[in-house]
């Protein structure tokens, strides 16, 4: 999928967890074989070229495309798996694959884990007994700095932006790169939808905040190209898994309000 994945498991190692880790790694390699748009022999590439019919694809392809259609509907078309006229479900696949890898570990008894797919994370349980996870979001305009820290339990955190890969997210209604934000982070519970909604919100520009405000169970934080920032009313606030006193917070020096001078 053109990125790096990592696993952080905070539970005592058992044979079952070791086997689950191997299964999760094999699962991600399988997803790459099926869905990678970088591989001409992948199922999704062959489907896009018309060499396969959807009915001939594995159930996972049909599941992902159904989830994509749902994200298109919820976002009013700002999420698109057909942006640029080419089939590309990458905006959902990574979060979906990471969430399932996390579930494989959980079902084997690993209850305190972080699975990281290219900076998009599915977090379960705690970092240590009584200690919530802390996720630093890199500032897209200031190398080596954090713009916000998200703290909590059982969270999904996804960030869309142009700092690492350039302007690769398209405005699907115009077919041009989206440029309304430098980065946009969405926090939810499951990474499948959280990742897709981060992509959609980044694409929709000025409408993103109001749209995220309308969604139950999701909060957002964004950095604008001029270095300003905005957040939804619940960020910082009561997010899924957050604890009193350790809520997500904006670090000192981060401006709130895209119109700040």
Image: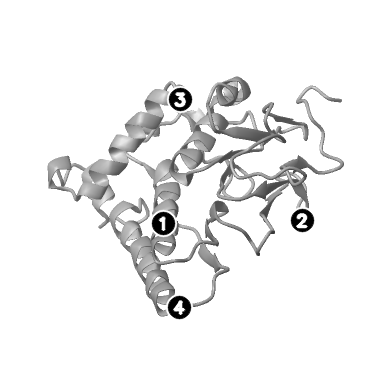
Residue at image mark 1 = 103
Question: Which quarter of the figure is the N terminus placed in?
Answer: bottom left
Q: Give the crowd class for mark 2: few <14, some 14-19, many >=20 residues within 10 Å.
A: few
Residue under label 2, please give it. 144
Q: What element carries label 3?
A: loop
4 or 1: mark nearer the eye: 4
**Residue at (51%, 36%) from the top-left corner?**
199
Q: Residue at x 53, y 55 (%)?
A: 124
* Relative depth, front residue between 202 and 221: 221
- Residue 256 visible in the shown view: yes
Residue 254 appears at what percent x and percent y?
Answer: 82, 38
* Quarter of the picture holding the C terminus: top right
Q: Which mark is residue 75?
A: 3
Position of residue 15 measured from the top left corner of the image (x, y, whole percent): 41, 79
SS for tag 2? loop
Q: Is residue 191 shown above or below 104?
A: above
């Amino acid at each position: 999928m053109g990125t790096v994945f990592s696993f952080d498991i905070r539970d005592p190692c058992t044979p079952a967890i070791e086997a689950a880790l191997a299964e999760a790694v094999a699962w991600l390699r399988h997803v790459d074989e099926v869905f990678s748009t970088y591989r001409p022999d992948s199922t999704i590439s062959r489907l896009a070229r018309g060499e396969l019919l959807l009915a001939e694809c594995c159930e996972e392809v049909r599941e992902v495309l159904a989830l994509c259609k749902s994200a298109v509907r919820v976002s009013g078309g700002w999420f698109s798996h057909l942006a640029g006229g080419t089939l590309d479900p990458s905006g959902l696949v990574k979060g979906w694959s990471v969430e399932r890898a996390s579930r494989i570990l959980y079902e084997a008894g690993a209850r305190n884990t972080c699975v990281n797919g290219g900076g998009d994370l599915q977090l379960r349980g705690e970092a240590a007994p009584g200690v919530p996870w802390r996720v630093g979001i890199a500032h897209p305009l200031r190398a080596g700095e954090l713009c916000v820290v998200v703290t909590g339990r059982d969270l999904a955190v996804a960030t869309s932006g142009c700092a690492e890969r350039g302007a690769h997210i398209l405005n699907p209604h115009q077919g041009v790169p989206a440029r309304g934000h430098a980065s946009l982070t969405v926090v939810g519970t499951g990474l499948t939808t959280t990742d897709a909604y981060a992509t959609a919100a980044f694409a929709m520009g000025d409408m993103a905040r109001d749209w995220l405000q309308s969604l139950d169970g999701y909060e957002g934080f964004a950095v604008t190209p001029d270095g300003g920032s905005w957040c939804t009313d619940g960020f910082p606030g009561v997010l899924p898994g957050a604890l009193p006193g350790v809520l997500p917070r904006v670090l000192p020096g981060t401006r709130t309000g895209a119109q700040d001078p």
